[in-house]
Amino acid sequence: MKNPIGRLVAVGLVAAITLAVTAGAASAWPPKGSFLIDGKLEHPMLLSTEEIADLLATTNPHVYTVTFQAGTAVETHTFTG
């Protein structure tokens, strides 16, 4: 048997690298395709893109029209969201 301690160290390194790579992939936050709505909220939420699309389809969006002076011209823009 050649250098059992060297083999043990090599196996330990491979295990540690595998664990680090697996843990890194598993700990991606928020998960791909989702959004975390967080901050000073009573109820933070984690929503998928499908859940957001469904939510937007079932709610009445707020529509804001703003008018402002831009140089010598007056501009009006409407925002929905």
Image (cartoon, rainbow, N blue to C red):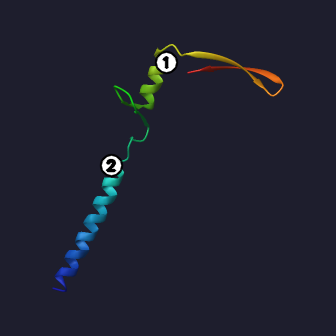
Report crowding for label 1: few under 14, some 14 to 19, many 20 or more residues within 10 A (C-alpha): few
Q: Secondary structure at mark 2?
A: helix
Please identify the quadrant where the N terminus is shown.
bottom left
The quarter holding residue 70 reads top right
Q: Is residue 69 above or below residue 9?
A: above
Query: Mark 2 belongs to which amino acid?
Result: Ala
Mark 2 and mark 1 residues within 8 Å of each other at the beta carbon: no
Q: Give the image location of residue 43, x and y in percent.
A: 34, 26
Q: Is residue 44 above or below residue 80?
A: below
Please identify the quadrant where the C terminus is shown.
top right
- Between residue 79 and residue 17, name the one nearer to us: 79
Q: Residue at x 45, y 26 (%)?
A: 52
- Between residue 70 and residue 64, name the one nearer to us: 70
Q: Secondary structure at mark 1?
A: helix
Q: Which residue is mark 2?
A: 26
Position of residue 39 in the picture relative to residue 70 (left or right): left
The quarter holding residue 50 reads top left
Q: Earlier in the sequence, mark 2 or mark 1?
A: 2
**What numbered label is drawn on residue 57?**
1
Query: Mark 1 belongs to which amino acid?
Result: Ala
Q: Residue at x 42, y 26 (%)?
A: 51
Q: Residue at x 19, y 85 (%)?
A: 3
- Between residue 53 and residue 41, name the one nearer to us: 41
Q: Give the image location of residue 59, x and y in percent.
A: 47, 15
